[in-house]
Each structure stands twice: as C-alpha cells, then as structure tokens.
Image (cartoon, helix red, strand yellow):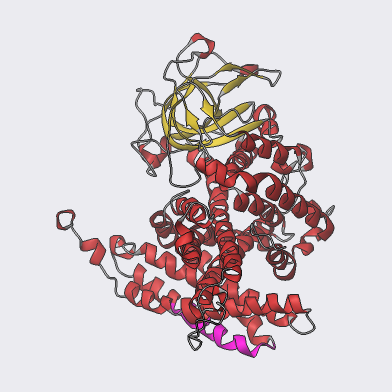
Amino acid sequence: MQSKILSRRDIDFLLYEWLDVEALTARPRFQDHSRETFNAALDTAEQIATDLFAPHNKKNDANEPHFDGEKVTIIPEVKTALDAFSAAGLMASGQDYEFDGMQLPCVVDKALSAWFTSANIATSAYIFLTVGNANTLLKTATPRQIERFVRPLLAGEFFGTMCLSEPQAGSSLSDITTRAELDPVAGPEGERQYRLTGNKMWISAGEHDLAGNIVHLVLAKIPGPDGRLIPGVKGISLFIVPKYLVGEDGVPGERNDVVLAGLNHKMGSRGTTNCLLNFGEGRFKPDGKAGAIGYLVGEPHQGLMNMFHMMNEARIGVGMCAAVLGVTGYLHALDYARNRPQGRHPAEKDPVRPQVAIIEHTDVRRMLLAQKAYAEGAMALVMYSARLVDDFNTAPEAEARAHAGMLLDFLTPITKSWPSQWCVEANSLAIQVHGGYGYTREYNVEQFYRDNRLNAIHEGTHGIHGLDLLGRKVSMQKGALFKAISAELAAGIGKVRLADAPDLQGYATQLEEVWARIGRVTTTLYEAGDMNKTLANASLYLEAVGHAVVAWMWLEQALVASGKLAGASEDDANFYHGKLQACRYFFQWELPKVPQQLDLLASIDTTTLDMQDAWF
C-alpha cells in the first residue's frame, strides 16, 4: 500500500536516478556508505515517521500546548516520538563520527528529515531547530562550548532554539534592543559570561519539558563604553543562553532567568510551542544577580554573521517543509480521487449507470497534475540544493566547491520561497479535490494547508527574499552568481539537445528563451537609475526566476525519465510517464506565465511604488 506521507519511489528517483548520490561514496567523508546504508537509514526514518509521528499529527493540532502560568503541557505522544528519533541516532545523522554521527550526505539527510516533517511538522520542529542550533555552534563555538552544549544537543538530551525577532522589531534585526552586559564574574572554567535583558517573540520550541535543557541562541547587543547600544546590525552579538545552567560536570542545574511570558497561537503547526520569552525579568536570579546568563559565541559584534549559518540552513529546511506538505497533500488528494465515486462523464447522462471515481473527471485530473507539478518540482529543487551543499563541502576540486557555493547562494532565496508559495497552492487544490469534505477537520488536507501557510513567513517573507535575490544575489561578485546559474542551466539544456528525446526539445528551447529574457530584464532593472524602482517589484522577479528554475528542475527529471522508459517494468513505466506528463504540464501551463511577468518588470512599473498611504 502506497504511503500517503511521501512517495518512496520519488525519493529513490531523486537520489539515485537523477542526483546520483552513490557517486558521493567515492569521497573520503562518505566512503563508508553505499546505497544499502542510505536505504537502511531511509527505511528507519520511514518506519519511525509512520509509526510514531504521523499517528498524533491531528491530535497535536487539536490539542495544542497550553500554559497555566507555571508549566507548559504538551500531549505525551510528542515526547515518545522525539525520544524514538533520538534513540535511533537520527539527531546526528549528518554529523561527524566524532559526535556519534552517521556522516550521511546532506542530500540523504534531507530525505530523512522529509519523512518526519511530512508526517508531523509540529513535532518535527523541535528536531529542525535543535539540529540547526547544533550546526551553528559547531561552526562558531569554542571547544568547551561544543562539549557542554553541542554534544547533548546531538544526543537529543538538550533541545535548541533560535531567538532573533523581538516584538518591536520583527524582521528588522537592526532594531533589536536585547542587551548583553559583561558580567565581571567569570563563568565555568573562566569563560566570559554576560547578563542578558530583553524580550524575544515568535520563538518556536522556546519552552517545554521534552528534554533536559533548552539551549537558546540569542541575538543581543553589547553596549558601548557610553552604555548605549550600537545602532544597526553592526552591534549584534550571538549568545548561548541555556534554560538551566550547565555545571562543569555537564549536568543541568540552576534555573536561568529565561521565562515564558505567553504562548502565541498560530493557524498552523499548532503542536509546536511558539513563545514570547523574557530574558532577565528577575523571576530567577542565577548566582543571586539579575539578568539571564549567556555565553558569547564567536567574536563580539559578529552575531548576525554567525547566526546566518543557522538561518541559511533553516531557509532550505523551510523549503523542504513546504515541499513535503505539498507532496503529502497531493498523495491524500490522489487517494481520495481514486476512491470517491461521484458523477458521470459529460457524454454519459444515464442516471442508472454507476458513478465514476472523480479521478475520471478532467478538471480533477487538472488539479492533481498541478499539485504534482508544484510539489514534486519543489522537492526536486530542495534536493538539488542539498546536493549542492555536499559539493560545496566535499567536492575534491576547489573550483567545483566554489561553483557549488555560488549556485547555492543564488538558489537559497528561491529554494525557500518558491515551495512556500506554490505548495500552499497545491494544498489549496487538495482541499478542492475533496470538495466539501476538504475543509472539514475529519480530513487531513485542511490541516496541511494551515500548516504550510506559515512557511511563506518562516525565515523571511517573499518580500525579503525578493529583495535578497534581485538586490544582492544577481549583482554579487560582479554578477558571478547569475553567470554560474546561467551556465548550469545552459548545460542542462545542452544535455537535452544531445539526447534522443524529441518531445523535450521544444521545452529546452522554451526555457532557453525565457532565461535569456530574464537576463535582459535584469540588466534593464539595474539600468533604472533608482534602486527604489529597481526593487519595487522584487517579489515578482523572485516568482518569475523561481518558475524558470523549477522548469529547469522538471526538464532535468524528464530527461532522466525519458531515458529510462525503454525496457522499464509496467510500474516504472507508469512512474516515468507521470514525470513526463508533469513536465509537460509545467511547460504548457506554468512557464508561459513568466514572459508576461517579465514584460511588467521590464516596464519599470511603479504602480505599487507610487501608491500613497492616504489613498488606501
């Protein structure tokens, strides 16, 4: 019976038939691995996700955490699932053997995480944040900090958060006001410690009893000699602020002054605690003094740069969350459409004849095909980006590592934002396929829509990433990133030209023309002479470029599928035909939207820029 969480067949296709992850085992870091070890890890992930994460997804949504003023209560199934995840060693699946990790490639690790996120995004959030927290500290923390905090995080003994936003600042991190004052008293083994005061908002997993400690990574400002905070982002530093102070024996002890002020109640991911945290409000006074104790990570005033290690990883992770929720919504809609009889074909009006399954109706097929194109296209984009992480970290040649880094920098805002926009649309179509049942809580698809709607805001809105792509990435290093992605896309088109795939040649030409136009329009935008005008429609630019990139992802998949059809079994042939038809849909229905968007961008339209507050 096919899983409705994810398609294992599609994951195998992405990993082994397209991205050739087995080739990674020739690299020293992955030389102990093989397809068999990758499959064993995937099997474990699928089983735990199916047995322990998926069953409480709806219960978690209906019984969200609640706070009585003293304690947060979470349904017990959450801890059971997380304990099983940690016991299987999956928290450290991508880490070095030194940290009891498996040293799996990033692309395989992302495939593992896909099972848990799709099965239960709210419970998986505790994992997602903990792994990101640990990865950030591994890149920036001292050896002593790694021993005290990272090892317990990777063992699942501690969980982690990222504390960036504040009530008055939102996404504008330059306006944060949390203070970090140097404490004259040294911490463990002489480590400098600070006293933090301030508030952090929208902190997922910020308070719970699911693990022995919570390690908060907190952005705060160290005041200057005059006692004032440095304006802007230059004054921001990064601190470890544990819920419980950790003694030299590594055991959590005295309560730190990090206090839950209240829970936020979101439309989706309801099972994840989302918190307003007060630091240094005075309820607890560690060492008898005011202020939450924190330990500086890296150098002073380098906090934002250090936190970007976690933020960039998180952006690819959010893209994965969006993609897999699109996939599971599609699989649920597909199963429903195959099993729900209703109506008859337009040419058959005899009411005595039996009703047909709704998948027989053309419009239902349209909606299912659109979902497949969005969700599997998004999955391909995320997995391709994860494969770039492996090349950036482990490719033998420096030139290949640098090239992968440029591709990754360019694609990150797209990898985060495109799935967050179009897989929500896929979830909306899944509801539509279910008809009136789709918006009832008895069916799962309405929850997938609510859960996924958050991803358009998590780790930056479309507006922020549009500004990042058009305002920074296309012009970085004198356009080197744009040239790198253009070369890669051209190479993909070149493979199609050389292949015995006549049905794909027109798509290759179509994509080539669209990408060339994107290049010309980008130049036009930068020649506007006014960055306000250049960036006025940056979100539209992000959407247009994203559509072209996903068209490329579909062309890559279709090329593989086309080459595999000859001699394929019936099941495999059906799978490959599905890939080819989804590619056809994307090029017939979706990519043609881009030229119209480019026309608008090329006109330097100022409709939204010229709108005045008083006119609304």
Q: Residue farthest to the front?
A: 352
Q: Horizontal and vertical percent for residue 263?
A: 44, 33
Residue situated in front as seen by the camera: 468 or 508: 508
Q: Can the viewer see residue 76?
A: yes
Counting labels gives 0
Q: Is residue 149 left or right of residue 161?
A: right
| Residue 510 is covered by the magenta coloring | yes
Task: Residue at 71% x, 18% y: name it.
Answer: 249
Q: Which image quarter: residue 168?
A: top left
Residue situated in front as seen by the camera: 568 or 556: 568
Q: Can the viewer see residue 476?
A: no
Q: Which image quarter: residue 567?
A: bottom right
Q: Against 14, is 127 above or below?
A: above
Q: Horizontal and vertical percent for residue 313?
A: 58, 49
Residue situated in front as seen by the camera: 518 or 7: 7
Query: Magenta region: which residues?
Result: 500-517
Q: Horizontal and vertical percent for residue 374?
A: 53, 68
Q: Residue farthest to the top?
A: 288
Q: Against 574, is 210 above or below?
A: above
Q: Against 6, is 49 above or below?
A: above
Quarter of the image with the C terminus in it: bottom left
Task: Residue at 33% x, 70% y: name it.
Answer: 527
Task: Residue at 69% x, 21% y: name it.
Answer: 250
| Residue 254 is covered by the magenta coloring | no
Q: Is residue 528 left or right of residue 46?
A: left
